[in-house]
Image (cartoon, rainbow, N blue to C red):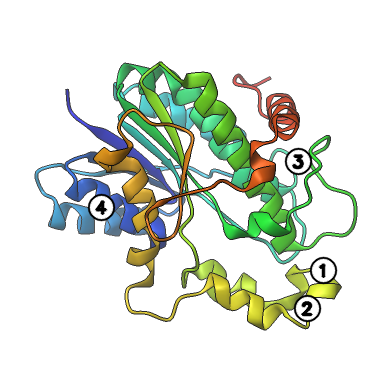
Amino acid sequence: MKQTAVVTAGTAGIGLETALGLAAAGLEVTVVGRNAERGARAVERINSTAPAHPARFLAADLASLDAVRALADRIVANGPLTVLVNNVGAMFPDRQDSVDGIEATFAVNHLSPYLLTELLLPALRAGAPSRIVNVTSGAIGVAKRVFDAVEPPGGYYGFHWYGRAKLANLAYALELAGRLDGTGVSVFAADPGGAATDMTNGTMRDPKIVSPGLRLLWPLVRRKFERSTSGPASVAAKSSIFAATDGSLTGRTGVVIGPEALPVAPFRPATDPRIAEAVRHLSERLAPLTAG
């Protein structure tokens, strides 16, 4: 059986470097993104480095739940799936709603990968042993930990809300690992650490994305999430590639892979069953598996 992988937001940056790594490991990779031109360039680059395993591009706006459902249908139609890397991520300087009327940070960073993962579980079970990798972030450390509603109390600050959505997604990943234990589907989280991406070079330079008390220190804090070394995206992708392919993880699940591509202790609040339960109830309500 052929080994297949899907990488969301895989047309540039960390996602593209992850796709390149998976192709080099022998997987047939599908990259997902919004822009067809960038998708074509990504596929061309992947195929030039791993021509034995032709890549393909699927267009989807992952801010739309209906688009996620349609994407899942197309992926399932391709047969069993070996690896799913939920790499999509977005941070917004100003509050905005998704096409579904849901706050966009939570929609893109948690609901989208949550819904896609749940819809692809049959394909992942068919492809077992298989792996799910959710890309997390150090921003979870500044997140509010209340998930009884999509929006936390207080004002909108993009970095904190991004961290909260990533915390929700990490709690979901760890809960899912327990739920799937024994099925042959392993679940991991991968922290890329700092990386010079469009997000860090753009949105994260705006101090209004953090609460007023953090703004004076923001230039120092922000450096944690940036890299100045050559090839930063390829370095940041190592944790995802390790989680998706490394043999030392065979038979394991619920492991967080840190920026050095080694297992690390998970952020403790993400292991709290009360948070996981609240996240799951909120996710099921906002992103049902079927539309309507």
Give the alpha-carbon distance from disc 1 to disc 4, as whole Å: 37 Å
| Residue at 73% in and 54% down | 143
Disc number for residue 247: none
Q: Is residue 137 left or right of residue 84?
A: right
Which comes before the other along the chain, label 3 or label 2? 3
Cα separation, mark 2 vs mark 1, equals: 7 Å
Q: Quadrant of residue 188?
A: top left
Front in this rendered view, residue 117 or 290: 117
Residue at (33, 53) in percent of width and height? 18
1 vs 3, front mark: 1
- Identify the secondary structure beneath mark 2: loop
Q: Could you say whether the residue bearing mark 4 is in a helix, strand or loop?
A: helix
- Tag on residue 101? 3
Can you tell which mark lies on residue 21? 4
For label 4, count other residues whose C-alpha is less than 10 Å away and answer few (under 14), some (14-19) or many (20+): many
What is the C-alpha distance between the residues marked 3 and 2? 29 Å
**Lower sequence index among marks 3 and 4:** 4
Q: Which mark is residue 215?
A: 2
Residue 14 shows up from this direction: yes
Q: Which numbered disc flags the more N-terminal residue, 1 or 3?
A: 3
Label pair 3/2, CB-CB below 8 angstroms: no
